[in-house]
Amino acid sequence: MIEDKNQQRTSLGNLGEFGLIEHLTHDITTSNPGTLKGIGDDAAVLDFKDKKVVVSTDLLVEGVHFDLAYMPLKHLGYKAVVVNVSDICAMNAVPTQITVSIAVSNRFPVEALDELYDGIKHAAKIYGVDIVGGDTTSSQKGMILSITAIGEADADAITYRNGATSTDLLVVTGDVGAAYMGLKVLEREKQVFQVNPQNQPDLDAYSYLIERQLKPEARRDIKEILKALDVKPTAMIDVSDGLSSEIIHIAKQSGVGCNLYEEKIPVDPQLINVCEEFNIDITTVAINGGEDYELLFTIKMEDFEKIKGNPNFTIIGHMTQESEGIHLITRANTKIPLKARGWNALQNESEE
Ligand SMILES: [Mg+2]
C-alpha cells in the first residue's frame, strides 16, 4: 500500500561497513552543550554537571515490533526515537542524547537506510537530542533496530513508578487507544492491498488513528507544563503497553490500589466511530491498546485545583489502599478488577 517503489538501489556491499556508517552519519552535528564528543571516536563524551543521568534502551525487531508492509522506513526511524524519548520523559527528565544501532540484511539497499536515518535525524531534531554513537552491521534476516536514549534531570525532579500514595489522584495526558485502532486499520488495508494491489484506499476517516500508530509523539512538553503549574507528579510512567497495564505497574510498585473510572477515560471522537465500525468495545481498546506514548501519573489531592480544566490532562481515577485492589468502575457503576492484558493479548483475543 505504502510500499516505496524506489528506483535507485545501491547494494550495501558497495559501501562496506565503514563506508556505510560514514555515509549515514557524516552530516550529523550536535547541539547540546552536554555533548562534548559525539560520533567519531571510540566513545562519546558527555557532561551532565550536577544533574542526574537517566538512560533507557529499546530493541525493535522486524516482524515482531514492526511490519514494513505498512510502516514506511522514515516513520519507523522517527518512531524508534520517539518511544525511547518517551521513556526519558516518563522519568520527568529531559532527553539529551541517543545512540542508534542497526542490523540489516542485504535485502535492504543503501537508499532504504537513508530513509530510516532521515526519520531518526528528523526526530532527533524535533526532540532536541544529539545522535552521539551507535553501530551498523549486517543481519542474516530482516532489520533490527536498537536505540538508547540518555536524559538529564535534577535529582529531586526525577519521578519513579513507586511514589504514589493511597490518597493520590490518577492523571493521563492526551487521549488513549487511537494508536491500536490505527494498527487495526492498517492491517485491514494491508489485506485489501494483497488481494487487489490497484486499490487506492481512502483513509481520511482514519487519519488521526493512523498518525498515532505511524508517527506517535513523546510528551516532552509535560515536564515544563507541570513545572509551570507547580505540580510534581508523585509517580509516573509512559503509556506504551496500555493504560491498564501501566496503572497496575504504578499501583503495585507503590503498594497502593486504584479506582479507574470508565467515563473519565479520554478518547478521540475518531476512535469512537472506528470502534463502532470494527465492532470493538471502545473501553477495551482505550485501556489495553498501548503505543499511545502519553504520560500517566499520580498527583497529590491538594494539586487538584492546579490540574483541573487543563486541556493537557484528564483526571481518570484515584489511588486507594492496597487492600482495596485495582479496579475499573464502569459507567453502570460496577467494579471490575483491572487486568494487564496489554497490546499483544488484545491482538490475540481479537483474532480468535
Ligand atoms: Mg516506559
Image (cartoon, helix red, strand yellow):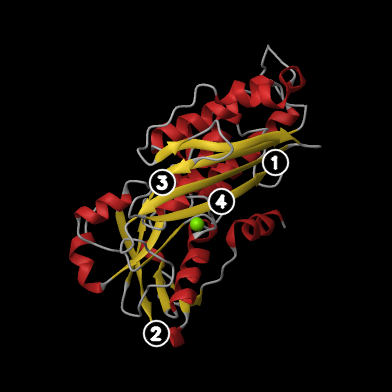
What residue would you read off at disc 2? Answer: 321
**Label 1 CB sits under 8 Å from any ligand 1 atom:** no
- Disc 2 to disc 3, C-alpha distance: 34 Å
Q: Residues within 10 Å of mark 3 (few under 14, many from 20)?
A: many
Using residue 233 as the reference point, say whether residue 344 is left or right of it. Answer: right
User: In x, y percent, where is residue 74?
Assistant: 56, 29
Q: Report the amino acid beneath label 3.
A: Pro
Is label 4 within 8 A of ligand 1 (CB to nearest ligand atom)?
A: no
Disc 3 secondary structure class: strand
In the displayed structure image, the side of residue 164 where residue 206 appears, left or right: right
Whole-percent x, y for residue 163 in the image: 38, 72
Task: Using residue 142 as the reference point, say whether residue 156 is left or right of it.
Answer: left
Secondary structure of the residue carrying numbered label 2 = loop
Tag 2–tag 1 contact (CB < 8 Å): no
Residue at 35% x, 38% y is 33
Mark-to-mark CA distance, 4 and 1: 17 Å
Residue at image position (36%, 70%) is 317
Residue 328: which quarter of the image? bottom left
**Gap in angstroms between the C-alphas marked 4 and 2:** 33 Å
Image spot of residue 189 (x, y percent): 64, 34
Distance CA(mark 2)–CA(mark 1): 42 Å
Q: Residue furthest bottom?
A: 323
Q: Which residue is mark 3?
A: 95
Describe the element under mark 1 as helix, strand or loop: loop
As drawn, which residue projects farthest toward the top?
Answer: 7
Q: Which residue in the protein does label 4 denote?
A: 57
**How dense is the environment of label 2, judged by Cα within 10 Å: few (below 14), some, or many (20 and up)?**
some
Task: Sort mark 1 into few (<14), some (14-19) or many (20+) by Cα contacts within 10 Å.
Answer: some
According to the image, label 1 marks what residue? 62
- The residue that appears at 65% across and 54% down in the rendered structure is 347
Q: Earlier in the sequence, mark 1 or mark 3?
A: 1
